[in-house]
Image (cartoon, grey):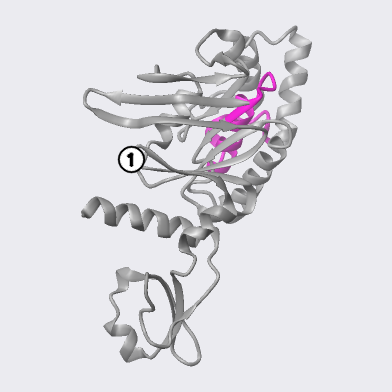
Amino acid sequence: MLTANNLGKKYKHTWALEPISLTLDRGMHGLLGPNGAGKSTLMRLFAGLLVPTTGDAMLHGSSVRSGNQVRQQIGYVPQTFQMFPQLTARQWLLHVARLKNIGTKREREAEAERLLRAVQLESKADLPARSYSTGMVKRLGIAQALVGSPQIIIVDEPTAGLDPEERIRLRNVLVELAQSSVVLFSTHVLSDVDMSCRDVIVLGAGKLHYNGKLEGLAEYASGKLWEWEASEHEWRAIAQEQLLTARRTADGIRCRTIADLPPTPYAAAVVPTMEDGYLALISSLTIGTKR
């Protein structure tokens, strides 16, 4: 169980993350928010890489900064994972295992083999990292975070820049890990959260705005999501920034938007998804800021 107790981080006079309190238990937790929302700050605080201004992050009642024994239970994968390009995946994992004081040489070798299988890199295990694709490097980044079987896995934007096949492969690795660990998964790809997470945290401008089930997030767009069929002439008159989607059909252009009132007399209310709820929430925060 990973807990934030009045956890916050301030730089001079600006809060990167205003004090928050929440608890993450076993499973996959999505972390959403626009750029500058405080997501990376929260993840680094949870990983023990930042000293909080207020409160603390706790793992089973102990501060994540209280010592190596606690820190070894946390695996962190930054958005940009770097390693020595001349090393192979096997060599890198053995190196990390030595740094984490994993048993004997035989035990470190067994750990490396286990993780290579877990992230599906066995066939490339003895090739230098400079020959790896972006997806392979990201899978290796997850593998090195898993050395020693940590209870907490924190992953920052793991699917950014990947093709659909690699995204699905990486997402499935995280879902498997979430069966026995706490996985905090930051992303801008909303469909990845919708497909793999049971809970979601939404940050905006350094504040916590939502922490709960996916269905609850969808409620933010309830009664505010509208669809209608527009003619070519009508579509040209619509302010494009107000639309979520505009899809051409045999009869015209199918429009979808979030608004308090129907945008046209023939717009119909539709059932929102988690993605619609997130966009409605973020839109309301933006409007509030402009006011």
> Which residues make up the magenta segment?
124-153
Q: Which corner quadrant holds the N terminus?
A: top right
Residue 82 image position (x, y, % from top left): 48, 28
Q: Is residue 140 left or right of residue 34?
A: right
Q: Nearer the viewer, residue 287 or 98?
A: 287
Q: Tell me if I can see residue 88 in this picture.
A: no
Image quarter where the C terminus lies is bottom left
Above or below, comparing residue 283 to residue 7 in the picture: below
Is residue 33 magenta-colored?
no
Give the residue drawn at x 53%, y 66%.
272
Q: Secondary structure at mark 1?
A: loop
On screen, residue 234 above or below 152: below
Residue at image point 61% right, 36% down: 139
Q: Is residue 126 magenta?
A: yes
Question: Residue tagged by mark 1?
Answer: 36
Residue 149's place in the image compared with 222, above or below, is: above
Q: Residue at x 25, y 50 (%)?
A: 289
